[in-house]
Amino acid sequence: MSQSEITTKYDLPVIFIPGFMASTLERERRGLLSLSSTVWPLNVVTLTTQLWGLRNQNSLKATDLIAGYYDSLLDFVTGPQAGGGLGRKTNESFWVFTYDWRQSCHDSGQALAIFIKEKLDEANQRRDKEGLPLWDKVDIINHSLGGFVTRSTIQEFAAPVRRVVYIASGHYGFAKSYFVLHPASVGKMLDDFVIDFIPSWYWNLLKLLPNIWYLQGWLAKLLRTFPSVYEMLPDQFYLEEEPGLILDASTTPPRKIYGVEATYFENPWEFPLEMQSRAKQAFEFKTRLGRDLPGKDNLVIYAETLPTYAQVTYNGQLEKPEQLAIGDGTVIGASVSRAQPATQLKIEASHTRLPNHPQVHAAIRGFLL
């Protein structure tokens, strides 16, 4: 194999896809003066306006990563190979795909497919002039919800992707999304849910705002309008084998509930009717993604050392969820590992810390280089 063939095969460009809430969102204002305004992240001065902007179902423009989310991971990707990095160059062989994390991952997957084509075309124009081998595929590193976006762009839009690193992506679903979506779920699950996807310091800073009660109430309602949160629900592949989300203690003996219908669309704990249609659309999307990960060149990195919310008891009402499984504090290990990855690695870290963990970087380096 010639050096050019080796370069083409193994030294592919890398695209990183962040997780839920990790991209800044802006709303474009059209008129004589084209202005934009930040909708996420929130701040105390424009809080009310931003919440209304998030509620708007129109697509928002994702402009950047929120500072501090993935700094160590980005440094690793762009660091020199001699120093332990991947040696990719920003805007030449490495790009970050930010997206409107509220919308369906189907829509984000379509946008990613277009993004990949555009970046390959731009890079190959430069490489052709420099006499370098042209690229026909990319490698992807993703985190959390970014795994769904990746699977969509491959399965539904045939994007030219060769190798994929999935970091803490709950392929079959996140139990906490059920607990935070269901209006009858008891307990302060909103805080637990949010800090699983954004750094805890950021959420704790927001909670210092004088109108935090207003913010929490709005966010709880907003989450029930985002298609992506429904797509994070434990799906048919999760519920056919794992202990159900519900332990029905109103019967003797108590029974575990299995299956999508019995969990979401039947029984006293069913979703309200206005939420059921969104859930059904989400499960149709997950059916299209399939049970197993696409392709054979994939690495799954996850944790299975932390107590993780997995089940809630029904005894006339939904009680506080209990930590009945192990995972990364957000997603149980089985939701990650059962999707037939080619290679998988368990590392001790929480959901938000995994992308920046040195052992994760070493594993990615070994997989991609």
Image (spheres, rainbow, N blue to C red):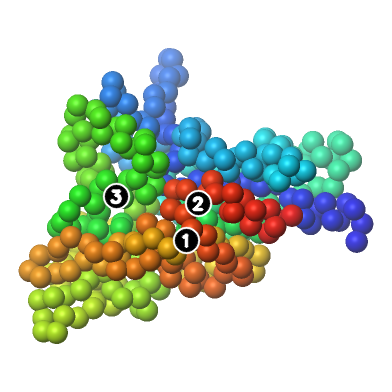
- Horizontal side, residue 163 vs residue 318: left or right: right
Q: Which of 205 and 173 is in front in this view?
A: 205
User: Any mark on residue 354, and which?
Assistant: 2
Q: Measured from the top left, where is residue 66 in percent x and y?
A: 46, 34
- Horizontal side, residue 127 vs residue 248: left or right: right
Q: Is 38 drawn above or below residue 283 in the view shown?
A: above
Q: Earlier in the sequence, mark 1 or mark 2?
A: 1
The answer to whether one can see residue 4 in this image is: yes
Which residue, given by chain and number where applicable, does mark 3 sit on? Answer: 192
Q: Nearer the viewer, residue 324 or 141?
A: 324
Residue at position x 88%, y 52% in the image = 4
Residue type marked 2: Leu
Q: How far apart are the two marked residues, 1 and 3, measured between alpha carbons?
A: 18 Å
Secondary-structure class at tag 3: helix
- Horizontal side, residue 24 vs residue 210: left or right: right
Q: Do the residues labelled 2 and 3 touch (CB within 8 Å)?
A: no
Secondary-structure class at tag 1: loop
Residue type marked 3: Asp
Q: Measured from the top left, where is residue 182 in percent x and y?
A: 21, 57
Q: Earlier in the sequence, mark 1 or mark 3?
A: 3
Q: Are marks 1 and 2 in contact (CB under 8 Å)?
A: yes
Query: In the image as oriented, which residue stretches furthest toward the top?
Result: 32
User: Any mark on residue 303, and which?
Assistant: 1
